[in-house]
Image: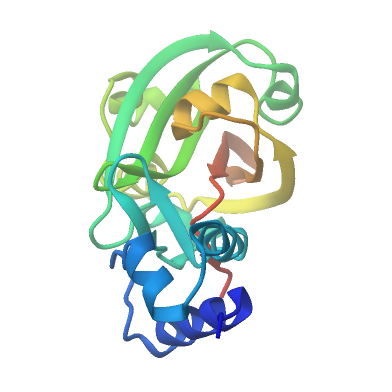
């Protein structure tokens, strides 16, 4: 008697929820799932697609299907203390002086600022692409902002330590959007997807010091608490 796609997905979700299949574990190959649940290969593919849509698993090209990490979302003041979790690495792409884009200038002021671009990765997988636009005055206290390297732990925290002035996240916006070409390149995506975008504004003593934007790819569910 043939099995059902819902039976297979319910079984795999239960194992993931119980922790017997952990984040990073590889799912059994298609042939093994076909045999275990008496399904056709197309039925197995449909089931895996459903699991991907719900954020339980993701594909790595040429390697297979893996259980996704439920990554805690670091936003607001928590983000000032660092943007990575254990096992993640920052890959700094560039720091360069640019004219503030219109939406940044509305908060930071018109003129030149420092645009810092990086990704956060778990191994070879990009779990976040982010950039910040930092007021040039910050470079007087944190000259590393101009350098193509990560600040330890963040430029906001270094500014606090050196200036003695607290930095706070004073505004935050979260929204979904369809990927831009720049998003797809940064996240390593080969097609259009809906992604979560979080924008934050950082200030000290009523002066806006920087604006940040973080983009989170599909297939890596986020813990919001």
Q: Nearer the viewer, residue 42 or 220?
A: 42
Q: Along the horizontal axis of the image, is 25 left or right of 195? A: left
Q: Which residue is drawn at 30% across and 40% down?
A: 62
Q: In which quarter of the image is the N terminus?
A: bottom right
Residue lying at the far bottom in this picture: please name it.
18
Q: Along the horizontal axis of the image, is 153 left or right of 37? A: left
Q: Nearer the viewer, residue 162 or 189?
A: 189
Image position of 171 with respect to 30: above or below:
above
Q: Position of residue 145 (x, y in %)?
A: 35, 26
In this view of the protein, can residue 23 be seen by the observer? Answer: yes
Q: Which residue is drawn at 65% across and 39% down?
A: 193
Residue lying at the far front in this picture: please name it.
1
Q: Residue at x 46, y 79 (%)?
A: 37
In this view of the protein, can residue 134 be seen by the observer? Answer: no
Q: Quadrant of the C terminus?
A: bottom right
Q: Nearer the viewer, residue 205 or 42?
A: 42
Give residue 139's quadrant in the image.
top left
Q: Which residue is drawn at 28% across and 20% down?
A: 147
Q: Position of residue 19 (x, y in %)?
A: 35, 85
Q: Position of residue 128 (x, y in %)?
A: 45, 44
Q: Position of residue 107 (x, y in %)?
A: 71, 31
Q: Along the horizontal axis of the image, is 218 left or right of 104? A: left
Image position of 12 with respect to 88: above or below:
below
Give residue 194's quadrant in the image.
top right
């Amino acid at each position: 008697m043939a099995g059902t796609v819902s039976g297979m997905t319910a079984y795999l979700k239960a194992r993931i929820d119980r922790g017997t299949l952990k984040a990073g574990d590889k799912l059994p190959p298609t042939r093994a799932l076909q045999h275990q649940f008496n399904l056709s290969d197309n039925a197995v593919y449909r089931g895996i697609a459903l699991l991907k849509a719900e954020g339980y698993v993701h594909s790595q090209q040429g390697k297979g299907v893996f259980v996704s990490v439920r990554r805690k979302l670091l936003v607001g003041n928590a983000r000032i203390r660092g943007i990575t979790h254990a096992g993640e690495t920052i890959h700094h792409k560039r720091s360069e002086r640019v004219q503030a884009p219109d939406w940044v200038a509305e908060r930071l002021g018109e003129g030149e600022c420092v645009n810092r671009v990086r990704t956060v990765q778990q191994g070879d997988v990009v779990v976040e692409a982010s950039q910040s636009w930092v007021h040039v005055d910050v470079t007087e206290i944190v000259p590393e902002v101009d350098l193509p390297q990560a600040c330890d732990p963040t430029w906001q925290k270094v500014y606090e330590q050196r200036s003695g002035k607290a930095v706070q996240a004073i505004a935050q916006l979260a929204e979904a959007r369809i990927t831009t070409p720049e998003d797809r390149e940064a996240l390593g995506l080969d097609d259009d997807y809906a992604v979560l975008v979080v924008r934050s504004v950082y200030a000290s003593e009523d002066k806006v010091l920087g604006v940040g934007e973080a983009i989170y790819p599909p297939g890596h569910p986020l813990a919001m608490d």
